[in-house]
Image (cartoon, rainbow, N blue to C red):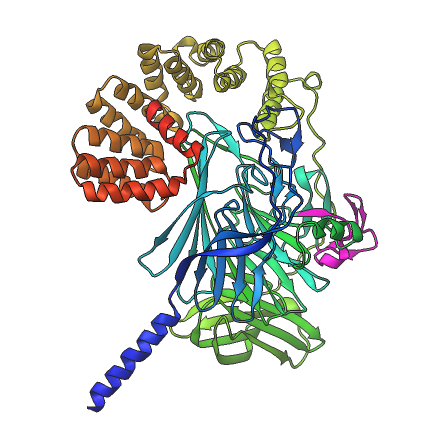
Amino acid sequence: MKRYFFIIIFLVIAQIVSAQSEVTLKEESVVMPTYPEAPAEKSPIFFRNEAYQGASRHYYPLSMNDQYTNEKIEKAWKMVVLENEYIELGVSPEIGGKIYYATDKTNDYHFVYKNTVVKPSNIGMTGAWVSGGIEWSIPHHHRASTYRPSDYTTTVNDDGSKTIWVGEYEPRHGMRWTIGITMFPGKSYFKTEGRMYNSTPYTYTFLYWANVAAHTNENYQAIFPPSARVATYHSKTDFTHWPISTEVYRGSDFTEGVDISWWKNTKKSNSFFVHDLQEDFMGGYDHGKNAGTVHVGNHNIVKGAKLWQWGSGPRGQATEARLTENDGPYVEIMVGAFSDNQPDYSWIRPYEVKRWEQYWYPVKGIRGFKNANLNGAVNLEKENDNTIFLGYYSTQKVDNARVIMKNKYQVIFEKRIEISPDKPFSESIQIDGSFELTDLYTELVNEGNQEILVSYQPVKLDPVEELPEVWEGYPAPEELETVEELYLTGKRVELFYAPQHDEMDWYLEALKKDPGDSRTNTAVGNNYLKKGDYKTARKYFARAIQRLTNDYTRPATGEALYLQGVTLKALGLYKEAVDTLYRATWDYAWHSAAYLQLAQISVMNSDFENALEQVNESLWTNARNNRAIALKASILRKMGDFEGAVAILNTIKENDPLDFRINNEHYLVAKESGNIQKAEKLFASLEKEMRDFDENYLELAVGYIND
């Protein structure tokens, strides 16, 4: 009987622990005070040579939404909420899909700013923008649709985690972005998985930053890694020492030596980007509340770390007051992938996918942090001549942990502890005798598997004597002597969507010096191709190919051949297009994109066998290409291979559940294979996710037309 009694007790305890570690996901209707926008303009405005956040303000075919009714109402907003025993976050799909707030339940601290009023102001590219939360600034800063509803769906994962997916088809370029926001059982962090997909046959550029707002006050300090010694401004037009600035920086006089990591010390609005981030974390800390926010991401991909603030002076506070009512000022502790500045764009090739991961978690009870990873954060500070403050925060419960501190190779402090997100460790440790701070080393060890969870050793850094050179702007075409300089300057103008500049000015000047230059002719042809002037584009590509293949040479790059193939296809010259595209496939860089174009031509001719072979070749060098996956599924469906179609569709479903072409193919396969009940269920789900938004239906239709 005793044995059965203990088994029952064990099962009950296991169920309680399991329930405590469960992630819940729910959709709520949250009523918030709201200042409504007026109806958007009916006719979108073409480009007017305006600048926005350092780039050209292209927002057609989107319309301006920059007028307001000047009234306050109570409005119900949809909120999708994730929660476990430690943290809670809410995502607002009707406000750009942003994370609206994130809260540490152990101390009720909003480690991502929560704005309890929806009060838009004209800060976005098309107008309306609201402060707070985490905004997905993609493919430009404060993306044009930031205040508009986004697509969303949710998934439950095998490991007990749950994910909210948000995303959209970006109508200005025809690209797609998706963000998956995942919460895990028993962890105080949440993960975001970003995905930028160029679903077009053209090369574009994009920028991504997570715009993270945090509540601030006179006790708030932005925390960059200790190795961050230099900060820079937008476009790298100014530099300053960090954290102690001794310069006049963007109109603020810090020459007497000011610690600009503290919000209270920067009176005017300003931006501080880490110059050459070398570590995987950053964040901020409220020393008054002894709590803060940590971001973790692979700094080789998530290269951008930034502090932005309106300023603690009267003007900045007056501006912030227009964005909220009672929630106070905020700072932006922003992080960017494939970017370290704004504007700082990266190229994305036809059908290419860029992916990245980021994590955020609250931190408390350790007076700040000097190092952080997914296991937790550590702080080590000298309190006086012989006392060290040591603090550890853990993102999960560890029943049998050990804290160690060494002076050189000698263990001077060791303690076994239980640590968890609601029970951080901190202690002031007295050290006998003299010591150098850089001789100290500390680590938190999980005794269960002898894993070092997080560690830190102060490093002596040489002072930065000379700041980097600032960027002086674009030199005039006539000032550049070589074709290469003209070409590269034109590419930079194109890369950065430089306002008030036209890359063609530099390209055409280069062609004056060398009319046959292959790089420049390719760039000019690409310009006309994107505009739909196929005949003019063809002439420039032909000139580039002539130089590249001179003396019967096989070109080292297939870009001009690929683009000429796309042009010929658009002109209806399919035989010539096939010949040119096949030559482009000989270059690995253009192999996948060219084979997809060939497969599309074969489908147009109902040659499904050849199309299947070509799309398989395309996927061989780019298995992430949604368009190729969807096309292969369509081909297999047409050939009656329904199982094969489902198998290929499932390879992308988990990574991009908001791709409506993929979801529509699932529906068509079920319908055409006779599984009517499943087809009806899939159709209802697809219809809900497409949310009766015109652009989603246009994207779906155009995708089938092009294939």
Quadrant of the rendering where the N terminus is positioned:
bottom left
- Magenta highlight range: 243-272
Q: Is residue 66 magenta?
A: no
User: Could one spot residue 181 in this view of the protein?
Assistant: yes
Camera-side residue of 700 and 684 = 684
Left or right: residue 466 versus residue 64 is: right
Whole-percent x, y for residue 471 in the image: 69, 34
Extreme residue toward the bottom, this view = 2
Please determine whether, in this image, residue 308 is positioned above or below residue 537.
below
Please determine whether, in this image, residue 248 is positioned above or below residue 390.
above
Whole-percent x, y for residue 550 in the image: 44, 10
Left or right: residue 520 versus residue 630 is: right
Q: Residue at x 57, y 55 (%)?
A: 32
Camera-side residue of 504 and 380 = 504
Q: Residue at x 80, y 44 (%)?
A: 251
User: Could one spot residue 359 in this view of the protein?
Assistant: no
Whole-percent x, y for residue 553 in the image: 40, 14
Where residue 497 sits, quadrant-wise, is top right
Q: Residue at x 68, y 58 (%)?
A: 328
Where residue 312 sits, quadrant-wise, is bottom right
Camera-side residue of 44 and 417 = 44
Please determine whether, in this image, residue 694 is positioned above or below residue 272.
above
Quadrant of the rendering where the C terminus is positioned:
top left
Camera-side residue of 443 and 170 = 170
Where residue 67 sits, quadrant-wise, is top right
Q: Is residue 262 magenta?
A: yes
Q: Residue at x 67, y 80 (%)?
A: 433
